[in-house]
Image (cartoon, helix red, strand yellow):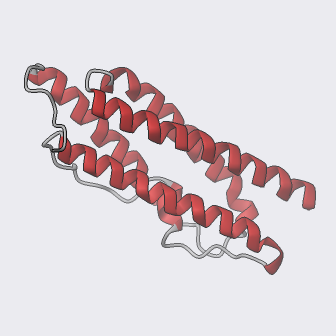
């Protein structure tokens, strides 16, 4: 049986947790990583390894959104409406190394949002677990992107 939000908690507390999770879901679906699933950055043959690494991160970020949707389902809530982030519409045909600074900044933004949400979702253990796991994943992504950016900078 899937654990659900405790019935003993107040509705205001429940609403705050659901709003925080919905906000994180909007951040995930509005991120540059999400948009890279649709975009086709220019990848020279010499950057194939970097492209593969970024694609792994893109795939894992898609799973983050799925985890948040499943969490909302366990909380007996529904995801709110999503908007496309128009600031990510210019990703097509850019060189991958040129996108790395934006990807790093986006991961830093997501980490900041998840850190802020932790104080709200602590009220619900299931939500705290998911948010903490995704936060740790974003921190690992940031470290990996920074390593890729350093390697790209050293190679140019």
Q: Quadrant of the C terminus?
A: bottom right
Image point (69%, 49%), residue name: 144
**Residue 134: % across, % down:** 46, 42
Image point (62%, 43%), residue name: 140
Residue closest to the eye, 148 or 106:
148
Residue closest to the eye, 40 or 144:
144
Q: Quadrant of residue 108?
A: top right
Residue closest to the eye, 65 or 105:
65
**Residue 30: % across, % down:** 42, 53
Q: Quadrant of residue 20?
A: top left
Image point (16%, 37%), residue name: 4
Residue closest to the eye, 140 or 26:
140
In the picture shown, does residue 10 fall above or below 48? above
Q: Is residue 30 left or right of residue 40?
A: left
Q: How many numbered callouts?
A: 0
**Residue 38: % across, % down:** 48, 73
Residue 78 visible, this orientation: yes
Image point (38%, 28%), residue name: 117
Q: Quadrant of residue 58?
A: bottom right
**Residue 43: % across, % down:** 72, 76
Q: Quadrant of the N terminus?
A: top left
Q: Residue furthest front?
A: 1
Q: Is residue 17 left or right of residue 78?
A: right
Residue 88 visible, this orientation: no
Q: Is residue 23 left or right of residue 3?
A: right
In the picture shown, does residue 11 fall above or below 145? above
């Amino acid at each position: 049986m899937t654990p659900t939000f405790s019935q003993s908690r107040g509705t205001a507390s429940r609403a705050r947790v659901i709003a925080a999770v919905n906000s994180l879901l909007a951040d995930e679906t509005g991120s540059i990583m999400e948009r890279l699933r649709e975009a086709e950055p220019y990848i020279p043959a010499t950057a194939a390894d970097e492209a593969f690494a970024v694609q792994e991160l893109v795939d894992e970020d898609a799973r983050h959104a799925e985890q948040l949707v499943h969490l909302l389902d366990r909380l007996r809530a529904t995801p709110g409406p999503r908007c496309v982030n128009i600031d990510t519409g210019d990703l097509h045909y850019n060189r991958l190394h040129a996108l790395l600074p934006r990807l790093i900044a986006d991961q830093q933004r997501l980490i900041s949002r998840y850190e802020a949400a932790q104080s709200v979702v602590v009220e619900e253990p299931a939500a705290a677990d998911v948010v903490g796991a995704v936060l740790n994943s974003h921190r690992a992504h940031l470290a990996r992107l920074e390593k890729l950016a350093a390697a790209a900078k050293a190679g140019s």
